[in-house]
Amino acid sequence: MATMAVMGSEAVTKMVREARERLTEAERALKAVEDQIVEESDKLAATQVARVDECKLLALGKKGDPGKFDEAIRLANDRIIGLTASKRTRERVVAELRADFYNATAEQTRIENEKADREEFVATRGLIEQTNQAVDARDAAERQLLNGLTQLRGRKYRCESNRQLAMNAAQSAQRRWNGMRP
């Protein structure tokens, strides 16, 4: 798992997919062994019932040979023991594959979270830059407004109507700047 720290997102995604496939295959194999155990147990039970029936015949004084089932019972028990050992091995493999799959998905989640964090950081820095530019533009517009107001109000006008027009325009601009109606 230590190697996953330097792997890319695509490589980890591939690893997760492969781990999932291996796990699914191992679970199928485990299920097949469990089904074989059930099948062998059913055969063993049927053979034991047949042996009991032979014993009943023998007990009633009729002809019966319960010994003919001994070998079949022994073989069925041996197969069940072997299948049970195989089942335990497969269960261990499934447990290991589940752990690998869990670790791979955890790494994939970590990488995706880091990527989302980086994208969020870049977006946040962009928004900060836009906000700072807007503040700078506002400050520049305010300076330009103040210069304009100062020039309109501080200028000497030869004609009274031009002076009145300049004062009204300055007042209207200042009211609009302050968010009031002109």
Image: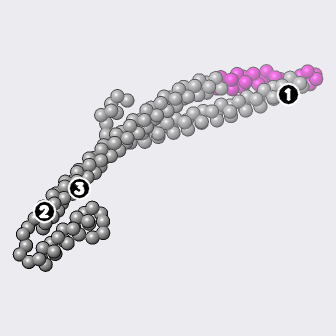
Asked whether, in this view, residue 64 is left or right of residue 141, the answer is right
Q: Amino acid at mark 1?
A: Asp
Relative to the observer, which residue lies in front, 40 or 2?
A: 2
Relative to the observer, which residue lies in front, 96 or 31?
A: 96
Alpha carbon distance from label 1 to label 3:
97 Å
Point 13% across, 66% down: residue: 153
Point 85% across, 27% down: residue: 53
* Residue that label 3 marks: 134
**What x and y, as percent, mark residue 70?**
75, 21
Q: In front: mark 2 or mark 3?
A: 2
**What x and y, as percent, mark residue 118?**
30, 43
Asked whether, in this view, residue 81 is left or right of residue 146, the answer is right
Is 68 magenta? The answer is yes
Asked whether, in this view, residue 49 is left or right of residue 15, the answer is right
Alpha carbon distance from label 2 to label 1:
120 Å
Residue 56: in sight, yes or no? yes
Point 89% across, 25% down: residue: 57
Q: Earlier in the sequence, mark 2 or mark 1?
A: 1
Relative to the observer, which residue lies in front, 117 or 47?
A: 117
Q: In front: mark 1 or mark 3?
A: 3
Image: 93 above or below 9: above
